[in-house]
Amino acid sequence: MASSALPPTSSFLSDKKDVGFSSFCTQPSFPCSAQVSKKRVSKKVVSVMTPQQSERKPSTTGAVKTGMTMTEKIFARASEKSQLIPGENVWVNVDILMTHDVCGPGSIGIFKKEFGKNAKVWDREKIVIIPDHYIFTADERANRNVDILRDFCNEQDIKYFYDIKDLGNFKANPDYKGVCHVALAQEGHCRPGEVLLGTDSHTCTAGAFGQFATGIGNTDAGFVLGTGKLLLKVPPTLRFVMDGEMPDYLLAKDLILQIIGEISVAGATYKAMEFVGSTVESLTMEERMTLCNMVVEAGGKNGIVPADSTTFKYLEDKTSLPYEPVYSDGQARFLQEYRIDVSKLEPLVAKPHSPDNRALARECKDVKIDRVYIGSCTGGKTEDFMAAAKLFHASGKKVKVPTFLVPATQKVWMDVYSLPVPGAGGKTCSQIFEEAGCDTPASPSCGACLGGPRDTYARMNEAQVCVSTTNRNFPGRMGHKEGQIYLASPYTAAASALTGFVTDPRDFLQ
């Protein structure tokens, strides 16, 4: 629920265009509108003229073709159809299936039950298995889940299994990566135009690469393991056109919190969310990943950003497999279009206990906090830590509350310790974090984003107030059911750590 103290949303989202009825016109050669003009037509015949005949080539499909969105085109290609419209159910060929330690054992169990205990997976090179959720814990059941994954991957000779055996020192496990959604991108499993399914709701993160990516359940994953196919319904598309110069105190997290606050956590239920515009084009790949990551918090089926030179450059050293980008047609049908002037946005938070409980960070300056958490698939990427370090360095101050840092992957952890922060005189993130009094960066994993076993690093085991760069703030999400979570960008999280209150990052960046 949006804060009543927010300025009129028209300054943020303007020209909201509801195409409504005309969105699904099946005969594009005729006007299709809810309003019909009632002009008087004279019945007097002035002249009769035979219209000029032009050569008419036969349709290749026997039906009139209409424009398609990016998501519809990917569905069409994956289902070997020439034309699709929202609402159609089609069998799609899956390019990549990802699973992890929480849902993998269940998916494997269903696969063996339905296809036979000696059955082989459909393609050992298209399955990616990434332990990442409940890793650094003494919980026996959590540890057993990883053992189940390992046994299955050995049995099936799965090519991409990012294993971890030594829990005492993650660096002793060269194959271990960390958070699946960031690892998928870093290891080259995300490619434009493809279909990527995963047993995790935030699989939609990969839509940043111009592909269809969404989360599925264990039963569906078990079926995909055996067949490489899944029956999916083509979603209609909401289009978000974001233009204007991005203020230097905003990050993509602010953009997606604005959108969720505008349309609500149910506003995009089973819809594709397509992000375009000059602002989106200016975003880095990691920031685009943040944008797509949280579409599921609006109920979205998938988020998607058109692939461009930024995408292709990122992929240069990540994959050698060919890929074919797709783009929405000029005549594509969008269920609704939103236009956002990003230059007018301010830093935002989502107050407890819903991602759509939007408020301006400066309106929450009296909210006292107990801790700050920077990490997760949403806010634990290299650029997220760079942003936090930039603000800490600019302030020259020390944090006033415990500040937990959980890099998403092993590569991110290395970046935190090795990459110099621009404008910081050669200092790395880790050096700046240490000077600011933050906790030492932890072993890469999902960490406390979704609570986990009681011994999970930085888990909320008490009823505390936390500013977090994660994606959900429902009761109990990070542990204690009475804990209060304010979702925020890395800038806002770092600023809040320095004051002990929810804080607008402009207090330190300007």
Image (cartoon, rainbow, N blue to C red):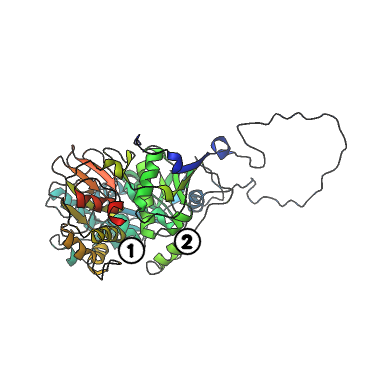
Residue 159 in which image quadrant: bottom left
| Nearer-the-camera pick, 65 or 285 | 285
Residue 163 rendering spot, x and y as whole percentages: 23, 61
Q: Under tag 1, what secondary structure?
A: loop
Residue 354 in which image quadrant: top left
- Pointer 2 local density, CA inside 10 Å: few below 14, some 14–19, many at least 20: few
| Nearer-the-camera pick, 341 or 196 | 341
Tell me the residue that label 2 is attached to.
Answer: 308
Q: Residue at x 30, y 44 (%)?
A: 362
Residue 312 rendering spot, x and y as whole percentages: 44, 65
Query: Of the residues shown, which amino acid type is indicated by label 2?
Result: Asp
Q: Residue at x 44, y 55 (%)?
A: 245
First in sequence: mark 2 or mark 1?
Answer: 1
Does residue 236 show up?
A: no
- Pointer 1 local density, CA inside 10 Å: few below 14, some 14–19, many at least 20: some
Is 458 left, or right, of 307 in this rendering? left
Residue 461 rendering spot, x and y as whole percentages: 13, 43
| Picture quarter with the N terminus | top left
| Picture quarter with the C terminus | bottom left
Whole-angstrom CA distance, mark 2 to mark 1, is 19 Å
Is 499 left, or right, of 13 in this rendering? left
Tell me the residue that label 1 is attached to.
Answer: 187
Does residue 130 show up?
A: yes
